[in-house]
Image (cartoon, rainbow, N blue to C red):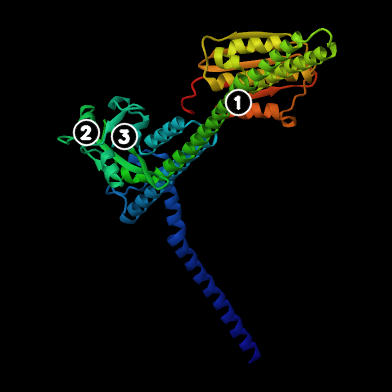
């Protein structure tokens, strides 16, 4: 009985194990058919979509009837859509990085807007892209253009928003707009676009700080019209454009504010110098002359009184010389009256070490540039004589490529550090506020070189 029971148990165990193996085999086959094989086919489809031409992306999946089976066709369309979305997202992120880099390095507003227009033109696959700014008088100004020279709307062009056009519709509604053709459309802008064969246009509003700032417009003159969702794509990027505009506008406002502060400070210094020259200085001159006349009129039997008055007159003349020196430090009259070259020659004559001037300048420069250049030379000459123990200073000033270049060198002991004194640091701030650059090279024992570069046209800052 025991042996029979053991045989039955062994048989049952073997049967159970065999059944489990069979069930496991069925499960493996089912999983392969249901999951592994479709995933492999999908992977192959993705590879074809990514690397094949559009007409041959699903060639491997075509059956005997010349069409892929319905499930595979649906999978191919879904994967293709996902791949296209990923490519679009990747391109948008790359454009965002390039524009953000442009903003971060402090590019001028015009350069940033030009970069934005260029990126948008490539992203939405159009042959022309514009960024326009709406003005208070009901017109719009083109502030950036890409690939659009053929439609006669360059940067700086200003046009009316009367009639029907994409930019006019965005201006009136604050929403996206689209037009596929300008035949019989009223308005001067529509007539201009019709003349330049614009077939299709789409636009989206740009809102900066809660205000309708302008619009981005895409145009097509050749090939098929814009894609049906072009205005939606443009709207997707308007936040990016608004951020770039806000950042560059903030930078421009800050630069303009700093420039105005510098100009206002220079004007105040000049007014103080005028007041000293026309008020206190003239009064001291009159007192010195009066003291001299009184001393000369005193009889010879009172030599002590004459000597004391002569001392007073001499003291007044000394104070007058000190006042003139202070006035020149505040703002030299010669700089205002005659310009930079005569002021630098006067500065060189007063210096107790030789100063070699090479100033290739014709006419007057903008006052902020002249004042900055004078103070740079004055600070460099003073430091060379008092601290660097130099025996020679050279000054080179010239206009090159529309910018003012200034180099001041000495043969002193070097080691100048802007952080150790307010003079050089103040010059650096002044030059930076005017949109220029200022560098100092002062290796120990090898002299000091100051180099400044300033824009000659300060209208954008003033």
Q: Mark 1 or 2, which is nearer the eye?
A: 1
> In 3D space, how far apart are the residues under numbered discs 3 and 1 (Cα atoms)?
45 Å
Q: Is residue 343 visible?
A: yes
Between 257 and 50, the one nearer to me in the picture = 257
Query: Residue at position x 28%, y 38% from top?
Result: 167
The residue that mark 1 highlights is: 272
For residue 103, side relative to residue 269 (left or right) = left
Q: Earlier in the sequence, mark 3 or mark 2?
A: 3
Residue 330 location in percent, x, y?
A: 64, 23
Query: Residue at position x 32%, y 38% from top?
Result: 136
> In 3D space, how far apart are the residues under numbered discs 3 and 2 (Cα atoms)?
14 Å
Q: Secondary structure at mark 3?
A: strand
For residue 427, side relative to residue 129 (left or right) = right
The residue that mark 3 highlights is: 140
Which quadrant, please, contains the N terminus? bottom right
For residue 327, side relative to residue 316 (left or right) = left
Between 62 and 159, the one nearer to me in the picture = 159
Q: Secondary structure at mark 1?
A: helix
User: Residue 280's image quarter?
Assistant: top right
The circle on residue 190 is 2
Give the residue at the far bottom of this rendering.
1
Q: Secondary structure at mark 2?
A: helix
Query: Residue at position x 77%, y 23% from top?
Result: 415
């Amino acid at each position: 009985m025991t042996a029979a029971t053991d045989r039955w148990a062994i048989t049952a165990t073997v049967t159970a194990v065999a059944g489990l193996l069979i069930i496991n085999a069925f499960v493996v086959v089912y999983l392969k058919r249901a999951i592994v094989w479709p995933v492999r086919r999908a992977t192959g489809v993705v590879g074809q979509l990514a690397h094949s031409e559009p007409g041959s992306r699903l060639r491997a999946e075509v059956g005997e009837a010349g069409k892929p089976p319905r499930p595979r066709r649906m999978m191919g369309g879904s994967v293709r859509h996902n791949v296209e979305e990923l490519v679009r997202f990747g391109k948008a992120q790359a454009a965002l990085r390039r524009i953000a880099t442009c903003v971060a390095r402090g590019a001028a507003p015009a350069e940033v807007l030009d970069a934005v227009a260029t990126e948008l033109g490539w992203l939405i696959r159009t042959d022309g892209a514009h960024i326009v700014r709406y003005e208070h008088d009901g017109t719009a100004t083109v502030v950036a253009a890409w690939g659009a020279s053929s439609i006669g709307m360059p940067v700086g062009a200003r046009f009316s928003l009367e009639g029907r056009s994409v930019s006019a519709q965005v201006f009136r509604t604050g929403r996206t707009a689209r037009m596929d053709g300008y035949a019989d459309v009223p308005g001067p802008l529509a007539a201009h676009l019709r003349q330049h064969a614009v077939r299709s246009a789409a636009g989206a509003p740009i809102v900066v700080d809660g205000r309708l700032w302008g619009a981005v417009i895409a145009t097509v003159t050749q090939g098929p019209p814009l894609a049906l969702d072009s205005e939606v794509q443009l709207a997707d990027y308007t936040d990016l454009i608004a951020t770039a505009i806000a950042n560059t506008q903030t930078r421009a406002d800050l630069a303009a504010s700093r420039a105005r502060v510098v100009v206002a400070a220079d004007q105040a210094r000049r007014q103080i110098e005028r007041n000293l020259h026309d008020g206190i200085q003239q009064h001291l001159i009159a007192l010195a002359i009066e003291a001299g006349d009184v001393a000369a009129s005193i009889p010879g039997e009172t030599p002590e009184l004459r000597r004391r008055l002569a001392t007073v007159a001499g003291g007044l003349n000394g104070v007058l010389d000190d006042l003139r020196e202070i006035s020149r430090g505040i703002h030299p009259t010669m700089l205002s009256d005659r310009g930079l070259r005569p002021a630098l020659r006067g500065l060189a004559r007063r210096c107790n070490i030789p100063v070699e001037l090479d100033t290739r300048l014709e006419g007057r420069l903008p006052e902020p540039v002249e004042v900055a250049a004078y103070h740079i030379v004055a600070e460099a000459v003073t430091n060379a004589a008092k601290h660097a123990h130099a025996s020679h200073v050279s000054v080179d000033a010239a206009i090159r490529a529309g910018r003012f270049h200034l180099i001041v060198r000495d043969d002193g002991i070097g080691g100048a550090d802007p952080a150790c004194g307010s003079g050089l640091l103040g010059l650096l701030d002044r030059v930076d506020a005017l949109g220029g650059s200022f560098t100092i090279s002062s290796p120990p024992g090898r002299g000091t070189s100051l180099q400044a570069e300033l824009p000659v046209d300060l209208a954008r800052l003033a």
